[in-house]
Image: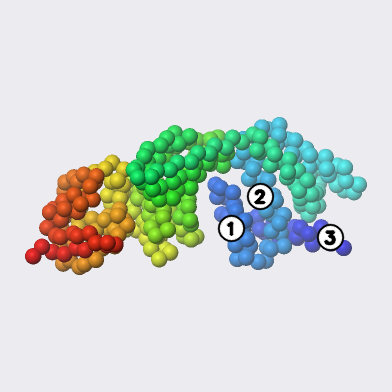
Amino acid sequence: MTTHTEMYGDDQLLQELFSNPSFIQLTAQEGLVDETQWLSWFDKYPRFQEVSLIARKLYELKYFESTTSVTEGYRSEVWEGIVAHLDSHPDKAARRGLGGIKIQQWLQYAAIFIAACAFGLWIYLAQTTKVFGESYATSTSKQEFTLPDGSKLWLNKYSTANYQEDASGRRLDLRGEGYLHVTKQINNGRKRPFIVEHDGLKVEVLGTRFNIINTAKTKLVALDEGRVRAAYEGRNMLMKPGEVVNVDRGVLKRLPIQSDLVNSWQTGVLDLNKTSLNEILIWLQFTYRMNIVGKLPSDVMDSTVSGQIDLSERQNVLKSLGNLYHIRISEQKDHFEISTLK
């Protein structure tokens, strides 16, 4: 026969779990801890495995109570239901109320009650939480969109985005390239997160202007204003305005280029302000998704120029850059070749 100690774990172990700094950090994140994160944490701390199930149930109940717009009356009904369930138990000790029940007993009955009302809780959440969903796509030209929360989205050509908004926050699944001006939102005194995510690259923002490229070959974030946290494969990087990061061989790295260069497609004008040739070659590579072939002297690579170039015609862009930096840039089938003028 399985006892409730075997089913739900030891009281002392559960108390240690909820006071563990690493576990506190895990459950303190704004979004709901997903199953992969949960299992990964308990694999790292196997001594807490036996209380993993009940810890998950209690965490989820607390999360939905704190993040869903429910009334105090509904919260009271939930906890009164637990008390009523305990009062109906034949064991006299269970009738002393929550204050007189040992943690181990409370966990047993609370877990039973949570399992019994889980379906009702999800129905209630579905009825009381508004979910917005919109899809956007471009073909041969860029386009501007206004998201349901008021944020602005500029999609580059051949890009798609799916927007969802619910009580937990705002999410955008973006494939291709997009520039965002995210509006700040406050709910119950807390900033509502806005998350852009696809294929492992995740960007968390609160209110900012930034560019993101998320394709099979290129994953890049360029921040113009505000603050974002870029994450990939379990690693994250807090970005400052003007910075650009990309995924290089599975690792997030900062690029030696200003963000306004990367974001120039949105305005249609390449604004050069003492911009080095080294930055321009990086910009060419990411803008046209083509490698650079050739080697130039360091003094040429470090040379800087100022001015503006219309981006509507690629050949005009290459010719203008060549004239400004006194080099030759020729477009081949799958790459750009650079060389000095003879």
Residue count near mark 1 (Cα–Cα under 10 Å), binned few <14, some 14–19, many ≥20:
few
Residue type beneath disc 3 = Thr
* Measured Cα–Cα span from mark 3 to mark 1: 29 Å
The secondary structure type at the circle numbered 2 is helix
Q: Earlier in the sequence, mark 2 or mark 1?
A: 1
- Answer left or right for 302 relative to 25: left
Q: Amino acid at mark 2?
A: Tyr
Q: Which residue is mark 2?
A: 59
Query: Which three-letter amino acid code belongs to the residue tagged 1?
Result: Gln
From what the image shows, is residue 186 above or below residue 219? above
- Tell whether 297 sits left or right of 189: left
Circle 3: element type? loop
Which colouring convention does the figure follow? Answer: rainbow
Which residue is labeled 3 in the image? 3
Q: Position of residue 100 (x, y in %)?
A: 81, 46
> Can you name the residue that lies furthest to the left here?
342
Query: On the image, numbered disc 1 is attached to which residue?
Result: 37
